[in-house]
Image (spheres, grey):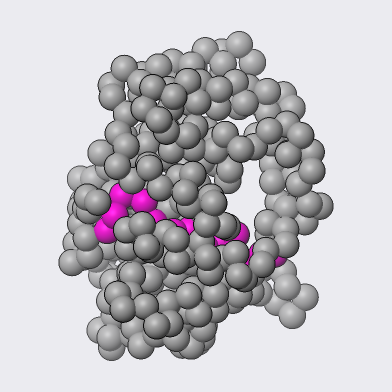
Amino acid sequence: METRRLGDSDMQITPIGIGAWAMGGSDWGPQEDKDSLAAIHEALDRGLNWIDTAAAYGLGRSEKVVGHALRGRSRRPFVFTKCSTGWNRDGSNKYALKAPSIRREVEDSLRRLQLDVIDLYQVHWPHPDTDIEEAWTEMAHLKEEGKVRFIGVSNFNVGQIRRAQTIAPVTSLQPPYSILVREVEREILPYAQKNNIGVIAYSPMYSGLLSGAMTRARVAQLPPEDWRRKNPNFNEPLLSRNLRLVHLLGEIGIRHGRTPGEVAIAWSRYNRAVTAAIVGVRTAEQVRGIIGAADFRLNVFEATQINLALRQESAAA
């Protein structure tokens, strides 16, 4: 499997990595740890070499599952996690970028992951904006101390990245990027490419909507706690448009023996500014449905066909 260097790091990462958000359970409905462990092992056995998680996923549960999955493996994958998004006693999220908070978070993440060092530590959200400099200074200290190997950001805009760069290099950026979410194309991706900042795109299948497995009936059966129930793209009138786009992804996939989801992932990697894509999985079966995206590339005609279809659908809306 091919690999690409992530930004200014020494890490050569596979084109897709394991996304562990849903393994936390709380934001996606019930999730069995045994299914999460099976998914991680299946992905690693098939050649993927990095996992992305966060302290906030399931109030630490996702990190614990990742740590459990890595015990006893002869070759440890790169482990990426995030700070700045914690939780209150009632389970609601809270944001904190103060230095003492970040230091507490890294120690907690190391304990849950059962690691001595984290390969890539990322600021999850730039909230509050006024504390970005304090947070990034502390992130640089953690790197100097050897608690983390490289530091990156997630959901930052160009202005916020520039502010961090005045303090210490930014190895990577993690933005949302998919056929349905393309705002980063205007400014963020060109800036990252020009400044050798690795980009690991998240939600390339738009949280399963572009996977080919998300039917109208399945959307209607999502658990009440699943955040997608309130997302406009999972509701009319956008749902019908999106399912038509999935049909096109399926037609392209048939030509290559790929699933619609693999085509959607390949689309996110078509932009050369993108180093790799995070693919969320919950079961070993889901891994088998997307693993082909690691070696699949769209040609110019296919990428143009998808973009044109989206423009036509948007114009008709």
Q: Is residue 181 left or right of residue 208?
A: left
User: x, y percentage for residue 123?
Assistant: 44, 67
Quarter holding the C terminus is top right
Task: Classify 269 as above or below 67.
Answer: above
Asked whether residue 141 is in view, the answer is no
Q: Is residue 156 left or right of residue 108?
A: left
Residue at 43%, 38% (x, y): give it: 262
Q: Quadrant of residue 140?
A: bottom left
User: x, y percentage for residue 271?
Assistant: 30, 36
User: x, y percentage for residue 63?
Assistant: 52, 75
Figure disc tally: 0
Residue at 70%, 77% (x, y): give it: 88
Write down the region rendered in magenta: 13-26
| Residue 17 within the segment the image draws in magenta | yes
Q: Is residue 302 left or right of residue 125?
A: left
Task: Classify 133 as above or below 203.
Answer: below
| Residue 298 within the segment the image draws in magenta | no
Q: Closer to the camera, 43 or 159?
A: 43
User: x, y percentage for residue 232?
Assistant: 69, 36
Residue at 56%, 16% (x, y): give it: 313
Task: Classify 306 as above or below 44.
Answer: above
Residue at 39%, 68% (x, y): give it: 80
Asked whether residue 216 is in view, the answer is yes
Q: Quadrant of residue 237?
A: top right
Q: Quadrant of residue 267?
A: top left
Task: Classify 262 as above or below 66.
Answer: above
